[in-house]
Image (cartoon, helix red, strand yellow):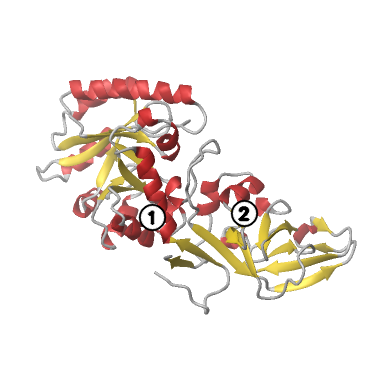
Amino acid sequence: MRSADASLRPTRAEVLLDAIGHNLRVVRAAAKGCKVLAVVKADAYGHGVVPVAQRLQAEGVDGFGVALAEEGIELREAGIDRAILVLNGISGGAHRDIIAAGLTPVLYELSEASAFDAVSAGRPIDVHLKVDTGMGRLGVPLGELDEFLRELRRFPSIRIVGLMTHLSTADTDPDYVAEQIAGFAHAQGLVRRFGHEPAVLHAANSAACFRHPETHFDWVRAGIALYGYPGSSAIDAPLRPAMRWRTEVLRVRTLEAGDSVGYGRSFRATSTTRLATIPVGYGDGLLRSASNRGHVLVRGARCPIVGNIAMDLTTVDVSGVPGVAIGDEALLLGEQDGAVLDARDLAKAAGTIPYEVLTNVSRRVPRVYLNG
């Protein structure tokens, strides 16, 4: 974990751990008594999985969700002792490692049931069974669940302790959410008829946590909400973005009418224009599609990105901001002098979603962890 250090390159992501703790409390309030599984896959959505998970564990979170076995093992090695659910199933031959690390696999393939049974040494293997109620990616399709459960009897070590599904339109289409939940209810009945009694049911993601209390069941799986974004523009929740992405002005220069800047000359000045060059680019995760569309905060003013974003450098029009100088802070995400840019702003400019903005911040951008 790094603290603020003047020797670091000026381009860095400041992760606000107090915001993470605050967001967990907001999610808990919305979940109304349900347990909260913190989804920390993809390096905690770009925020840094170990410091984030350590803070969440200190805040009393009930468990963690990861996509990959190696993500869960990393958490165990860092001292995380809560339940860890491997959401995307198992790749390769990590079955023994998963058991040794005390991770809980999500099961949806009979071949994986067979592999776990083979290394179980007669001990029960606790799994969460995933059913596909309409996402269409992973999970046992409802029409195949009966046969799946019949075949699962061949692997006596497998013990279904959780049943889950994943909602595809919690942020957009409540009618389809209702269809999925009806399918999930059917799956619950079928699983119980085969003699399984899962202690944990879960379906809700961040958007469903706030919009669909009927989907809460025993756990809610909070991902993007923990990092400050509710999962839907229709949701008004008092979340705090947890990443402040900043750099500093590297150079200031003036273009005259007709001058251009950057690869492809995509920006040409129509009048005298004052430009600031900042040391951040698509190599750092600033999406190139935000060229000539996005903004950066300098001295509390929104300054447009002009020209094509390059691998290491971006140029910003600061004509309307008096006195901009080398060393001034330039902010891509966060608050500066009362002005705010967040991942939704950059996502809109780049034609994408906040999830991609956050997870795209590359590993060469130092993460600095701040409390208070």
Q: Residues within 10 Å of mark 1 (few under 14, many from 20)?
A: many
Q: What residue appears at the point 43 percent right and 66 percent down from the top-left corner?
A: 369
Which amino acid type corresponds to the residue marked 1 in the rendered image?
A: Gly
Task: Tell which of 90 and 246 is nearer to you.
Answer: 246
Secondary structure of the residue carrying tag 1 is helix
Q: Is residue 11 above or below residue 130?
A: below
**Residue 200's disc number:** none
Residue 74 appears left or right of 349: left
Q: Quadrant of residue 217?
A: top left
Q: Is residue 97 visible?
A: yes
Q: Quadrant of the N terminus?
A: bottom left
Task: Tell which of 117 and 313 is nearer to you.
Answer: 313
**Residue 287's disc number:** 2
Residue 266 x %, y %: 79, 55
Residue 3 x %, y %: 43, 72
The mark lying in front, picked from 2 and 1, is 1
Which amino acid type corresponds to the residue marked 2 in the rendered image?
A: Leu
Residue to which mark 1 is pinned = 21
Residue 270 appears left or right of 51: right
Q: Quadrant of residue 210?
A: top left
Q: Residues within 10 Å of mark 2 (few under 14, many from 20)?
A: many
Residue 43 x %, y %: 42, 56
Task: Tell which of 41 and 322 is nearer to you.
Answer: 322
